[in-house]
Image (cartoon, grey):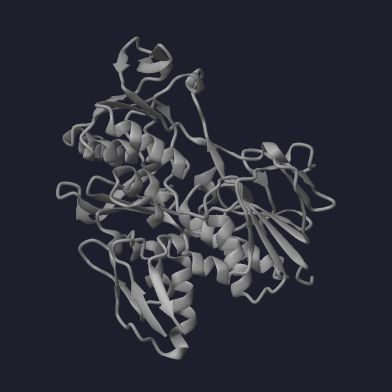
Amino acid sequence: MNAPSSVLVVGASAAGLATAEALRRKGYQGGLTVLGAEPHLPYDRPPLSKQVLSGTWEPERARLRPQAALSALDAEFVLADPAVGLDTAARTVHTASGRALRAGAVVVATGVRPRMLAGQADLAGVHVLRTLDDALALRADLLDSSRLVVVGEGVLGAEIAATARGMGLEVTMAGPQPAPMAGQIGPSVASLLAELHTERGVRLRLGAGVSHLSGHHGRVTGVCLDTGEVLPADVVVVAIGADPVTGWLTGSGLRADSGLVCDSRCRAAEGIYAVGDVARWHHDRLGTSMRLENRTNATEQANTVAANILGDDQPYRPVPYFWTDQFDVKIQVHGVLPAGAEVTVVDGDLASRRFVALYRHDGRVTGVLGWNMPKQTRLRRQEVVDALPDLAPALG
Amino acid sequence: MKVTIDQDKCVASGQCVVAAADVFDQRDEDGIAVLLNPDPPAEQAADVRHAAVVCPALAIHIEE
């Protein structure tokens, strides 16, 4: 296949920008357009819940590339104009402002959108955190408040709780799991994370669902749990996961099923690809469909998609990786940590709060987790790589 | 090729070491990336460029 005469990337965040950069790096000289829903030039999201929220970084520091590097890319950035429709056969994307952008290849990189609680949109003081504007709005509200309730005990909720504690707020974390990130890292390490948050003054109200938000004169006043307990709040952050932004593809003939469904080459249809948080592709080494919401996936998948656009035929077979920083703890995870995995500490120890743990399913290594031992954790990554073809049963 | 690392931005993922172990390492105590050779030879250039691409914090800067 010859390279297309032009490429349109729908999404101007990490995965979208990385696709544009990878195309140029691989020598692509055709027309390149990057369409973004937000008004901002591409910025990085991991710092939003940490350095940007805490104010340690000015927002500009989260920019993915300086202006000069973006100019050198020789791409047209069309910003503040969300995609609203795709004509698959004509490879034409329609935008909210009425543009019709046609290209030889279209890359869907529209990411995810935070889930909300019922009634949330009608109450002031209730936030989500996905965009730079979200982070700045939350920060402004926190600076003026004393009690924060974080609804959600996943990675994002736990990071926000830690950052807000560092800013001096009274913080309560609520969510249905028994401990923060229990679903991601398993009960034993999650209970250590619960200890950490408790020691640092985060009040945990876990193991109960949230029934609704309470408010007064249009402003949130608390979070009501299934148990009947009410958690008083000046500010609430809802971090209960996110859904792939695929609504605009309705009527395109493409299949969305918790993400835009792609083959093992990250191709949704002839000339149409997906990258980043929105992409659900077939990991042929694992024998399963997968969608990853993490930072390294955005870059790695973009590399593969750029190569495939230019005529390669590469399957995308990453080793999943994510990290999270909470208080002074760095947690790193390579591979997958299935529910019920057997956890063995192989370096350091739990008591000293520095360790590396291997996760096994049916006796086979599936992943490695490090707690304040990033280098030692990375040194175990190869064991996960070697085990990758055998991981399929663990993902069952 | 001149390579620099912004250690304040580094998130200790170690992706750079996976890509170019002759040029990058991580500190034992906190995993922050360190430069073994700020002026790598031509035969390592491609690996170093790949390291800069896959760094999830965009903390590696290269001057060709």
* Residue A395 appears left or right of A138: right
* Snapshot quadrant of residue A219: top left
Between residues A181 and A109, which one lies in front from this camera angle? A109
Q: Nearer the viewer, residue A321 or B24?
A: B24
Q: Position of residue A348 (x, y in %)?
A: 20, 56
Location of the N terminus of chain A (image quadrant): bottom right
| Residue B7 in the image: above or below residue A107 | below
Residue that appears at 50% across and 69% down:
A68
For image coordinates 29% across by 66% down, the residue present is B7
Image height of B39 relative to A296, above or below: below
Note whether residue A249 is visible.
yes
Give the camera-side residue of A255 and B45: B45
Where does the image place residue A65, in percent across and percent down from the top left?
47, 63
What residue is shown at x 35% (from left), y 63% (from top)? Answer: A378
Q: What is the number of callouts on the image?
A: 0
Q: Name, please, the residue furthest toward the right.
A: A89
Identity of the residue drawn at 41% across and 11% down = A217
Using the image, determine if residue A12 lies above or below residue A229. Answer: below
Across and down, in percent, residue A148 comes to 30, 27
Residue A183 visible to an observer of this rendering: no
Q: Is residue A379 left or right of residue B52?
A: left
Q: In front: A2, or A336?
A: A2
Residue A105 is situated, as x and y percent measured from the top left of the image, at 75, 60
* Quarter of the picture holding the C terminus of chain A: top right
